[in-house]
Amino acid sequence: MTTIAAPTAVLISPAELVALQAETPVVVIDTRDPDTYAAGHIPGAVNLREIFTYLATSSPEGLKELASTFAAALGAVGLSGKETAVFYEDAMNSGYGQSCRGYYLLTWLGYPSVKVLNGGYSAWKGAGMEVSTEAVTPTPATFPQMPHADVMLTKEDVLAALSTDTVLLDVRDVDEWIGESSSPYGKDFAPRKGRLPGARWIEWYRFMKPSAQGPMIKSPAEVQAECAVAGIKPTDTIYLYCFKGARASNSFLALKQAGFTDVRMYFGSWNEWSRDPALPIETGAPMAMAA
């Protein structure tokens, strides 16, 4: 039986968030749209929708713009490096992993302390916690300049990984995986439908399970079991992708919490890959399904 090491917990419960706020400076970041935020949010939370909406490219210029955009935005909501950032969305299955996208971006930017509210706002309300409709004006800070973590992939990295032992893991919805749709934004939003050649598939929902407070990310043992079905081991090198790096961020967090050590993400994902006709894609029924 595999012994799973317990990494530093990123996922926290509503009660743990309250305790954390009493112990240390915390900036709670609501990633939902402004109207939803205005209708009710965690007291003191700031609203930063761009965590979810930004579409990135993996060129040197694109990654430079991505870093500068979020350094400015996250500094503007009060992150100086001394505070713990805590992201949340409405529920873990309804926001396409947007709170986890905030976690991934701050991980890449080297920020020292990042958490995600497991279960999101639905878990907060389910726990009977106080809610607020009062808009919060953040206190701006200077976002720290730190070495970037080695978790970001370019399309060149992915191209070089084709036909190697690297696991290309597609976590998109089934209609995207089989080539019926190009994106969650619409069937024909992107110019090509399909998947990365040789990719394996675990739909991002499978890393979560229901609870009384809504969907929660599964335990390390459960995540390892999901991956074992797809022939993926904790020691494999895993390259994640989805459409724009949100659902893959949910999966990135699930895998890291489960002890998978070599996990990176192609953040440009299908939105970028599908727009370059020189890049190969795979269409039709996946080989495992063809028979």
Image (spheres, rainbow, N blue to C red):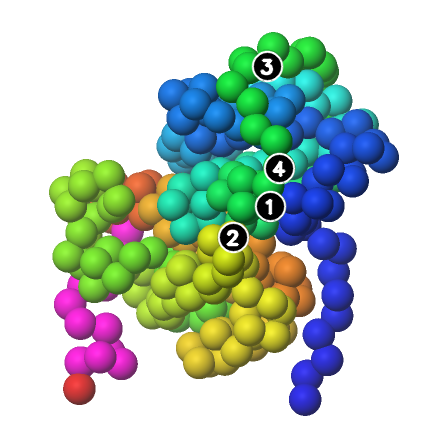
**Picture layout, residue 234 above or below residue 68:** below
The answer to if 38 sits in the magenta stretch is no
Question: Are the residues at dot 1 and dot 4 in contact (C-beta closer than 8 Å)?
Answer: yes
Where residue 238 sits in the image (x, y, percent)? 52, 64
User: Going 17% across and 86% down the picture, which residue do you hit?
Assistant: 291
The residue identified by callout 1 is 127
Q: Amino acid at mark 1?
A: Ala
> For the residue carrying disc 3, how many other residues have a C-alpha within 10 Å: few (<14), some (14-19), or many (20+)?
some
Instruction: Name the residue nearer the viewer: 270 or 225.
Output: 225
Disc on the earlier residue, 3 or 2 = 3
Q: Amino acid at mark 4?
A: Met
Q: Which residues are magenta?
A: 279-290
Question: Are the residues at dot 4 and dot 3 in contact (C-beta closer than 8 Å)?
Answer: no
Where residue 221 sits in the image (x, y, percent)? 61, 75
Residues under labels 3 and 1: Cα distance?
22 Å
Question: Are the residues at dot 2 and dot 1 in contact (C-beta closer than 8 Å)?
Answer: yes
Q: Nearer the viewer, mark 3 or mark 2?
A: 2
**Picture layout, residue 238 above or below residue 11:** below
Give the total number of marks visible in the rendering: 4
Instruction: Name the residue nearer the viewer: 44 or 63.
Output: 44
The residue identified by callout 2 is 213
Instruction: Name the residue nearer the viewer: 231 or 135.
Output: 135
Residues under labels 1 and 4: Cα distance?
6 Å
The answer to if 286 sits in the magenta stretch is yes
The residue identified by callout 4 is 129
Disc on the earlier residue, 3 or 1 = 1
Q: Which secondary structure is most common in the magenta stretch? A: loop
The residue identified by callout 3 is 136
